[in-house]
Amino acid sequence: MPTRKKAKPKPAKRSNQDQSPQQTMGLGVHGAGELPAVILKSYNLEIRDEEGFIGDRASGRAFRALLDEVRAQVSEVTKDPLGNKPSKDISKKQLDKILASGDTVAAGMIHGAIEEFASQLAGVVRRFLRLKAWRDTKRIVVGGGIRQSRVGELVIGRAAVILKSERVDIDLLPIRAHPDQAGLLGCAHLAPIWLYKGFGGLIAVDIGGSNFRTGIVELNVKRGPNLSRAAVVGLELWRHAEEKPKREEAIDRLIGMIERAIAKAAKARLKLAPLIAIGCPGEIAPDGSISAGAQNLPGNWESTRFNLPALIRERVPAIRKHETAVILHNDAVVQGLSEAPFMDDVRHWAVLTIGTGLGNASFENKRS
């Protein structure tokens, strides 16, 4: 007589109290591959060749190194018009000012570094476009700290011209939002729009290798149902790289920034969704841990005993008497999502973020 298979017991029904904030709000897992408006095809890719990681050629450090090379060449025959200050200590604003109205030789040196860096950026784009996840990409937006300068805009524009001259059919454009805001605006796209019904905003956090940013994303759904009219208010920025804090000190500072943002919303009578959305460097596991790529953050954020969403829920358990939900994703992904409302005319698109390192992500729009 055949053995009868035992029926699997039906799981007990779970009450809302048993469920996580993400589940009760209809949010997906941390680092999700399927997002409300797009499918995430890839992110945080690290490509190597015989010279090392190609991302190292398109970072803020790489541009400064190229500027150092140009300065060294000029200094062999004449006095360096940029003076004695190391390139890493010359701010983007100072470089922009020299380009606009400074010494012509100094401006020419900066243009030389721009040309070399644009060529390297074009090479990095070509390499990414050979990857399966990037193969159908028609538009790439470039964000990160370099976007916040005329130097960065010229780099992006020159790289675009180089690619077009090589018959590479790609649009390479600066990300439209200010670099201090793009990573916050993108946070709103981590949750489905229907979830925001009855709410005017959410708390957004952008964690970077040099800065932490927090702000309130005012959704303005009535004016832009696809979040195209969302705006950042109450922005606070902390340059942690200048202070070199320990991890625990950095988290304490971050919690204080979040609490101040919540207080600002209350004072402005803006009804917040009980959601804190975060962009953070690295590979984000479904449980909210960071498995790799967080080496530029203060302390060890890749420890199996460290879970940022859990820590924030513990320290900020409620927003307007509602249990707090926290959703975490990669920072380049989140910056890219700020462009989602404006990508209706292409199916496949991507983002590169040039800052302390090179971030990357590629997307496919969902069919409407």
Image (cartoon, helix red, strand yellow):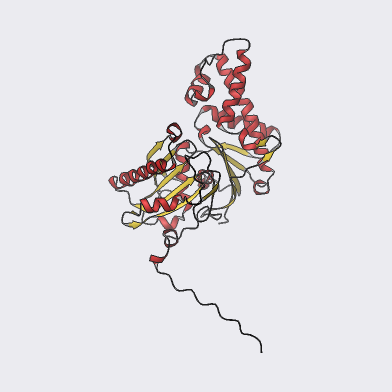
The image shows residue 171 at horizontal and vertical percentages of: 61, 39
- Foreground: 244 or 96? 244
How far across and down, in percent of the image, does residue 316 sit? 36, 51
On screen, residue 196 versus residue 60, left or right, reads left
Q: Residue at point 65% right, 42% down?
A: 47
Name the outermost residue toward the bottom.
1
Q: Is residue 14 above or below residue 64?
A: below
Q: How many marks?
A: 0
Instruction: For residue 160, say whether it is visible.
Output: no
Of the 4 image quadrants, the one containing the C terminus is bottom right
- In the picture, the quarter occupied by the N terminus is bottom right
Can residue 137 be seen in this snapshot?
yes
Task: State the residue lying farthest toward the top.
Answer: 78
Q: Nearer the viewer, residue 108 or 224?
A: 108
- Residue sitting at 33 percent across and 43 percent down? 260
Across and down, in percent, residue 265 comes to 32, 46
